[in-house]
Image (spheres, rainbow, N blue to C red):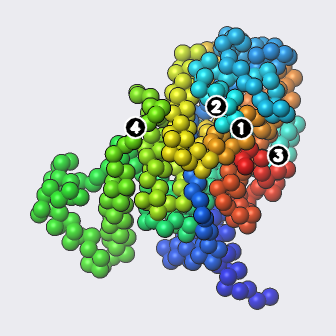
Amino acid sequence: MRTSRRDFLRKSLCAALCGAGAYSALGNLRLISAAAAQRPYLFGDYKALVCVFLFGGNDSFNTLAPVSGTERTDYAASRGTIAVPAGDLHALTPAAGGGPANYGLHPAAPELAALFNAGKAAVVANVGGLLYPVTQAQYQAGTVPVPPQLFSHSDQSVQWQTSRPDDASANGWGGRIADLLQSSNSGQVPMSVSLGGNNPFQRGAVVQPYAMGTQGVERLSYSDDGPEAWFLEGDNTAGAAAWDALIEPGTQTHLLERAYAGSVRRSIDNYRIIAEALGEPPAWTTPFPDDNELAAQLQMVARLIGARAALGMSRQVFYVSVGGYDTHAAQLNDHPYLLGQLSQALHAFHAATVQLGIESGVTTFTASDFGRSLGMNADGTDHGWGGHHFVLGGAVRGQRFYGTLPSLAPNGNPDDTGFGQIIPTTAVDQYSATLARWFGVDAGGIADIFPNLGRFASADLGFMT
């Protein structure tokens, strides 16, 4: 059968997006760009995905806990002295048919509870990395494959961010989306911007994330002239001239030299474009809290969203992160602090999107290495597997629970691996694909980006409009 050039390019793109070796050579990057051009995405609106990664593994079962019923009895028995008192939880009031009415959010998260009750946020229950749906019996018998290195921080955080537990070399699912949708933007700045440092989530075959600090773009300096000799500002004329000569197009003979010079030129260009577009920060009607690392990152995301027109953006993927969630001990002291920062930061950021008039175009979602164990570990919890996550924004079908809340029983729990870790019933693939569909990726693109999605019952969890 004869294969058309269009089909060949599309299949090549699929292989690249799935983390295969099609982009192992520099020349294949151009092939992937050509393939993406064969299926252009043009949008008349603006949308942004904002990944909030909680490093260490958030304890979902104290974040969201029952206030009454047999669930409360089971929870108290499983959690012992680290159980959150029922009277301290912020009651959640789901919409009709939106889930159980006997759960509440941690006392440190009143703002997040208010967003849920206002219909601006949803809970996606018991999400985790999966290769296939797996039951307790299958897990214990080893008859169904599960992701490698379960309960490992480094492995599970990467698998969450790539949604490819079966391919350690895979690019991130955010990066694969950016590779596919890059043609939708008219501006030069990359679609993916990170305020949380290097990350697998935004790593693509073509589009690489642009890293920034909370104060803006960090400028490069001369290695020989000290940190105050900023070549972008022209403070050092001789140094600037030498640097300009070094990165001048066409003056390098070696492939790696040309690649480096091109990267530096793009960095300089992007710095100038972003610095001009950002301007002065607006006066936020709901101020971002001080001394809150996550809030500082989200405030810069809000400023970049505010500059979307000047930057020529119709689609953007942002990444922010915060650590400290590995609460093996002192959980009753540490976890409230962490959740308080998260709740306040998300509240201020959502208010900023309302102020910018783009509330329905921005969707923020949480992710973490894994959930934590149901049972306590001294005065903390151990590494787990499945965990609950939050999605918020004007396009979220909020005030609802999605997925299946697990049993909290301390003994004979059908959702337990047998060692206190809750087996996920919603795959990261399903969670991510639901967000990708809202973002504008078509069915063919979703199949390319999430090749394991067909193993699960639903490709769309329904939490986005």
Q: Are marks 2 and 1 in contact (CB under 8 Å)?
A: yes
Q: Do the residues labelled 1 and 3 touch (CB within 8 Å)?
A: no
| SS type, badge 1 | loop
Q: How crowded is mark 4: few (under 14 residues within 10 Å), some or many (20 or more)?
A: few
Q: Which quadrant holds the N terminus?
A: bottom right
Asked which quadrant contains residue 166, the reply is bottom right
Of circles 2 and 3, which is in front? 2
Which badge, 4 or 3, comes first in the chain's sequence?
3
Find disc 4 in the rendering and name its residue.
283
The residue that appears at 22% across and 68% down in the rendered structure is 244
Residues at marks 2 and 1, CA–CA distance in whole angstroms? 8 Å
Q: Quadrant of residue 81?
A: top right
Residue named by callout 3: 133
Q: Nearer the viewer, residue 352 or 369?
A: 352
The answer to whether 124 appears left or right of 197 in the picture is: right
* Location of residue 99 in the rendering, given as x and y in whole percent from the top left corner: 81, 31
Nearer to us: label 4 or label 1:
4
Q: Are marks 2 and 3 in contact (CB under 8 Å)?
A: no
First in sequence: mark 2 vs mark 3: 2
Residue found 52% across the figure and 49% down from its top: 318
